[in-house]
Amino acid sequence: CVRCLHLSGRGEIACGEHSPGHGSDSWVLENWAAITPEESDEFERDLGRGPSCETCNAMARRAG
């Protein structure tokens, strides 16, 4: 779900499990925030798919 995903100021996408801890130095310094529905819609328009956690995707590729 979109509410479960976070976006960094550098454009990284991570789920709650793989994003830095909320309020941690990494969270603050890298400008992490929850992905908004508008950001999700824009992502899908631009790339033809919805946003997803980069770490989860990499783990699934390695396992498959």
Image: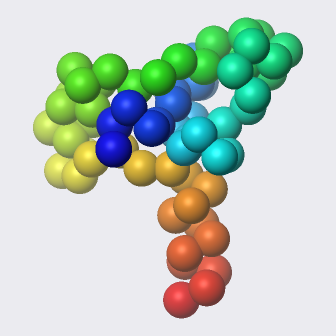
Q: Which residue occupies 51% across, 50% down?
A: 53
Instruction: For the N terminus, give its image quadrant.
Output: top left
Q: Which residue occupies 60% across, 19% down?
A: 32
Q: Is residue 26 positioned above or below 47 on the image?
A: above
Dividing the picture into quarters, in which one does residue 44 lie?
top left
Q: Is residue 42 positioned above or below 45 on the image?
A: above
Q: Is residue 3 left or right of residue 49?
A: right
Dividing the picture into quarters, in which one does residue 27 lie?
top right
Q: Is residue 46 visible?
A: no
Residue 6, given in percent of the width and then of the height, sits at 51, 30
Q: Is residue 49 visible?
A: yes
Name the one closer to the observer, 15 or 55. Answer: 15
Q: Which residue occupies 34% across, 37% down?
A: 2
Q: Is residue 22 left or right of residue 43?
A: right
User: Furthest residue to the bottom?
Assistant: 64
Residue 22, given in percent of the width and then of the height, sits at 70, 21
Residue 15, given in percent of the width and then of the height, sits at 54, 43
Q: Which residue occupies 52% across, 64% down?
A: 57
Residue 38, given in percent of the width and then of the height, sits at 22, 20
User: Furthest residue to the right?
Assistant: 25
Dividing the picture into quarters, in which one does residue 29 lie?
top right
The colour scheme applied to this rendered structure is rainbow
Name the one closer to the observer, 53 or 22. Answer: 22
Q: Is residue 29 positioned above or below 13 on the image?
A: above
Q: Is residue 7 left or right of residue 52?
A: right
